[in-house]
Amino acid sequence: MALFSAPGLEADLHKLLLSEAPDDALDKRLQDHITASLWSTQQHHNSGVYFQYFREECEAWRLSDSPVTIQTYQDFLDLVEHLRRTRHEKRSAPAVLDFFPPIQAADDEKTPTPSLTDESTAEQLKLSLRYRFPHCDPVSATNSIFLTVRLWLMLNVGSSAILTLCPGRSSPEWTEDQSLDNLIDSCFPASEWGPRLSQWPFSLHAYNLERVGGFELIWTDHLADHLYLNEDLGTISVYHHVQVLRGLLQAKSPDQALPDRLLTETLQTLALIIPRANRECKTWFEKVHTKYAEIIDHGAGDVEMRHWARSPEKFKFWGQRLITIKMAYDASEPKNLGQWWRDRRRRVEWYTFWVAVLVVFLTILFGLVQSITGVMQVYYAAHSGQSG
């Protein structure tokens, strides 16, 4: 059992994770303890956006009626520690399932685990989960692992019921024969680039992707969806939880699940997409954040860019998606006069187009002036004749 330094914290940790009123339990003291446990760091003063996601995920899971064995915040944190230690083991391995009460067979007619109900007393909730119930059904145990990984690593694994409640998100498959490490490897395949690729242009950032390329940026809470380009919808997903990325990087835990290189690259892609030194992009992001302050991490617009970040071949995990976005942006064509005016990618074509527009405009203008002048001449000539 973990040690509790703050008075009353133990009582908070033993409150229900999937409560109908999560705000009553998830106060600042408990938030600080959770982030310190997940990230092993005290740099968690800007974690409000993460806990907005935390609440929404718990609420979605509660509404889905997908059974889970874990009941309390302490159960969640204990399972995170257990998964860290067993991340090399298959999800169905005894070493992983040893966290739960004895697993009953799928065809066993025993009473299902009374998980996440009010049946457990306060004293029972203080017991280690393994000894709290006489048995545990396999579905509840599996769902507990899925929910914990969603809250901890922000990977969208889980039941189909959750996908129905939250459509539009990718859902990586985590089979029982895969370890947590295997899942992460499948979500983030590494690529080694050979020849040097073209540099990432200074003009290619979020503001121009929307205003020039015509793409829509979608802010995602799921790391595996980062930089995903949906060509049918013209959307680009951007994972924005900078505080989570920095927290995991600073943790320096030997049992860290996500590779440091992946976390660093993700931060640097944000520095590319939302460069803090670009005034137009900075202004654009501030407007977006003002509108969605509760769900977008403000730190996404304030990441320092490293010297190597403009070389796509340096990105072992995100290089392919960066190149896909660049190719789509280069291939995009303006769809209206506003995009034509802002699109300076091909200077010669831009000047040619606007010179042609100017010529057409002047031709129409002079033609209109001549027409009006002619009408006025006829009018005055007629009136002069009548006067004579």
Image (spheres, rainbow, N blue to C red):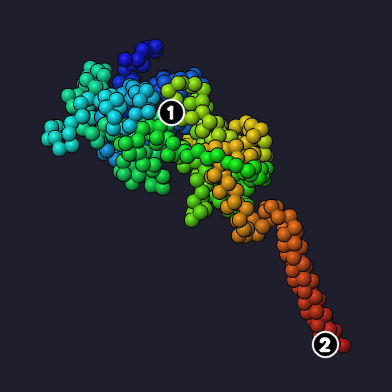
- The structure residue drawn at horizontal position 54% and vertical position 45%, both measured from the top left corner, is 321
At which x and y percent is residue 295?
47, 37
Mark 1–mark 2 Cα distance, whole angstroms, equals: 97 Å
Q: Nearer the viewer, residue 48 or 272?
A: 272
- The structure residue drawn at horizontal position 67% and vertical position 39%, both measured from the top left corner, is 278
- The structure residue drawn at horizontal position 40% and vertical position 29%, both measured from the top left corner, is 152
Q: Nearer the viewer, residue 373 or 171?
A: 171
Q: Which mark is residue 386?
A: 2
Q: Is residue 260 visible?
A: yes
Task: Give the label, 1 or 2, closer to the camera.
Answer: 1
Q: Label 2 is placed on what type of residue? A: Gln
| Looking at the image, residue 76 lies above or below residue 163 | above
| Looking at the image, residue 68 lies above or below residue 369 | above
For the N terminus, which image quadrant?
top left
**Residue labelled with disc 1:** 257
How crowded pointer 2 is (Cα within 10 Å; few <14, some 14-19, many 20+) is rated as: few
Where disc 2 sits, the SS reads helix
Name which of mark 1 and mark 2 comes first in the sequence.
1
Q: Is residue 253 left or right of residue 362?
A: left
How crowded pointer 1 is (Cα within 10 Å; few <14, some 14-19, many 20+) is rated as: some
- The structure residue drawn at horizontal position 39% and vertical position 36%, both measured from the top left corner, is 183
| Looking at the image, residue 126 lies above or below residue 176 | above
